[in-house]
Amino acid sequence: MGSKSLMFMGIVMCLLGILLLASPIAAGEFVIMAVAAVLTITGIVQVIQSLRYSVGLQRIVSILLGLIVTALGVLVWFNPEIGSGLLMALLMIFFAVNGLWKISTAMRFRSASGWVWLLLSGILSIAFVALLWSQWPVAGAWVIGVLIGIDLLLSGIAMIALSFSARRIRSSGYVDTINL
């Protein structure tokens, strides 16, 4: 990814992070409703595809899975508290994997000036897992909005810092991109 792309992504991520932090409850509720909509649509599409293209036992299993995903989406839509608990569990997995990825990437780019920001972002992602675990499943939508907002803001800062480093590296003629 080139320095301009890193800079653009960093700015967008920072702006989204600030927006989520400005209204964490609304942001968390929006994320929950978006997940519900995606689950419902995915389930319906799976059922339709199964009816059109599957045969035998595969058709039955695929239809059942599609109906389960659709039902889960509808359940989350009409009962966001269930969606909040489910989403927090998924966020714990996401933040754990994402945090480990950021830490390992930061270690690979220790020679770049922005690596510390990426390392800090990774460590905080792992800390978010501990926070979510201690509050799960009772914390509400606001926790989702705050954590995603902070993660986006810190990831954006790391991208911006890396873009400056990529620009310096490119001008030195050493390499033309940094692949994250």
Image (cartoon, grey):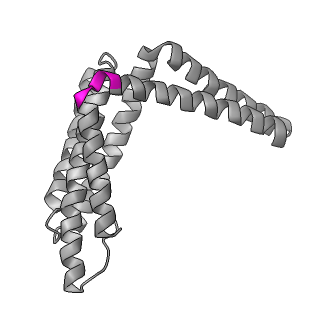
**In the visual, does 24 lie left or right of 40?**
left
Specify the quadrant of the image occupied by residue 133: top left
Quarter of the figure with residue 134: top left
Magenta highlight on residue 82: no
- Main SS of the magenta part reads helix
Q: From this viewpoint, is residue 136 visible?
A: no
Q: Position of residue 136 (x, y in %)?
A: 31, 22
Residue drawn 27% across the image and 54% down it: 10
Q: Quadrant of the N terminus?
A: bottom left
Residue projecting furthest to the bottom: 173
45 up-or-down from 176: above or below? above
Which of the two residues, 148 or 17, is positioned nearer the viewer here?
A: 17
Residue pictured at 43% horizontal, 25% vertical: 32
**As drawn, 58 above or below 26:** below
Q: Position of residue 78 (x, y in %)?
A: 52, 13
Q: Is residue 85 above or below residue 45?
A: above
Quadrant location, the C terminus: bottom left
* For residue 18, side relative to residue 85 (left or right): left
Question: Which stretch is magenta?
Answer: 22-26
- State the image coordinates of residue 107 (x, y, percent, origin top left): 21, 63
| Residue 175 in view in this figure | yes
